[in-house]
Amino acid sequence: MKKLFLLLILIGILLYLPCHNNVKAEDNIKEPEWSEICPSEYLDAKIYSNDEIENIATSEGTRQSAIFYCKPQGKTAKIIRGITIIPAIDCWTAKKIAISNIRRQYNNANISNYYWVERKKQFYNEINTCKTLSKNEKALCYLKIREIELQKTASKQQELYNQMMLRQQTIQNFNTTMNQIETNNRLQNINNSIQQNNFHLQNTNMQLHNINNALRGW
């Protein structure tokens, strides 16, 4: 009887442990955070409206041009590379260039940010769907989201890396081509110079020959 009682206790413990462990495993699976998925530089990514870009570009462009070009005391004309520049025109041109550059920067940022902004929306939509499930299903749903989103981020980062390497290779090829063209131009100039020297040398020899013949005839 005592042995049977101990056996029942042992069976109860064995049946309890797997269930207890499963509960703990499910409890340890927490809701994924966007910060786990998204690169830090895009955590606060946003899409700027045209009005926002224009306001930022105008404000920052005016500030930058004021520092370097639009000096209150610069009322007299100045000469840059042989060109006479009126300070007011110089200031106006610098401001236009600065605004255009900043506007371009924010438009390019919108292109990069759009991908991460849309993914963030999709991510939280999927999280909200998981929250409607039962405890067991929710844990599996969280695991699946984390796995899929991390894979998507890795693929995107690999894509960006490949694009960067392609740009660097393009720049390197361009520089190599330009260096080769410059080298060829230098070699051509040297060759032209040699030909000109040979031409002058031939003329000089011809003149000497004529002088020599004249002296002999004399």
Image (cartoon, rainbow, N blue to C red):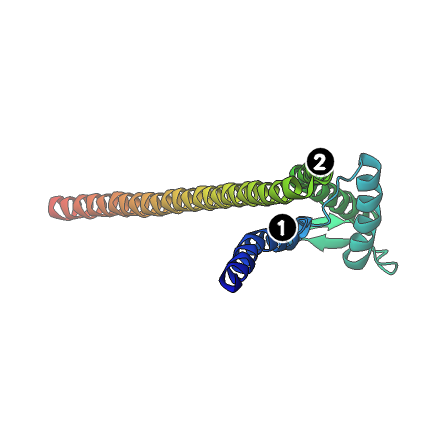
Residue situated furthest front in the rendering: 1
* Residue 90 position within the rendered picture, expressed as x and y whole percent measured from the top left: 78, 48
* Residue 105 position within the rendered picture, expressed as x and y whole percent measured from the top left: 69, 44
Which label sits on residue 129?
A: 2
Q: Residues within 10 Å of mark 1 (few under 14, many from 20)?
A: some
* Residue 127 position within the rendered picture, expressed as x and y whole percent measured from the top left: 70, 40
Residue 157 seen: yes
**Residue at the (69%, 53%) spot, across then down:** 80
157 relative position to 93: left or right: left
Q: Residues within 10 Å of mark 2 (few under 14, many from 20)?
A: few
Considering depth in this image, is 35 or 59 the residue closer to the camera? 35
**Residue at the (20%, 43%) spot, across then down:** 206
Question: In the rendered image, which residue does mark 1 sit on?
Answer: 26
* Residue 18 position within the rendered picture, expressed as x and y whole percent measured from the top left: 55, 53
Considering depth in this image, is 94 or 50 the residue closer to the camera? 50
Mark 2 or 1 closer to N-term?
Answer: 1
Q: How many discs mark residues in the rendered view? A: 2
The Cα atoms of the two marked residues, 2 and 1, are separated by: 17 Å
165 relative position to 54: left or right: left
- Residue type at mark 2? Thr
Residue 81 seen: no
**Residue at the (64%, 43%) spot, across then down:** 136
Considering depth in this image, is 161 or 182 the residue closer to the camera? 161
**Residue at the (49%, 43%) spot, across then down:** 167
197 relative position to 64: left or right: left
Q: Are marks 2 and 1 in contact (CB under 8 Å)?
A: no
Which label sits on residue 164?
A: none
64 relative position to 202: left or right: right
- Residue type at mark 1? Glu
Residue situated furthest right in the rendering: 72
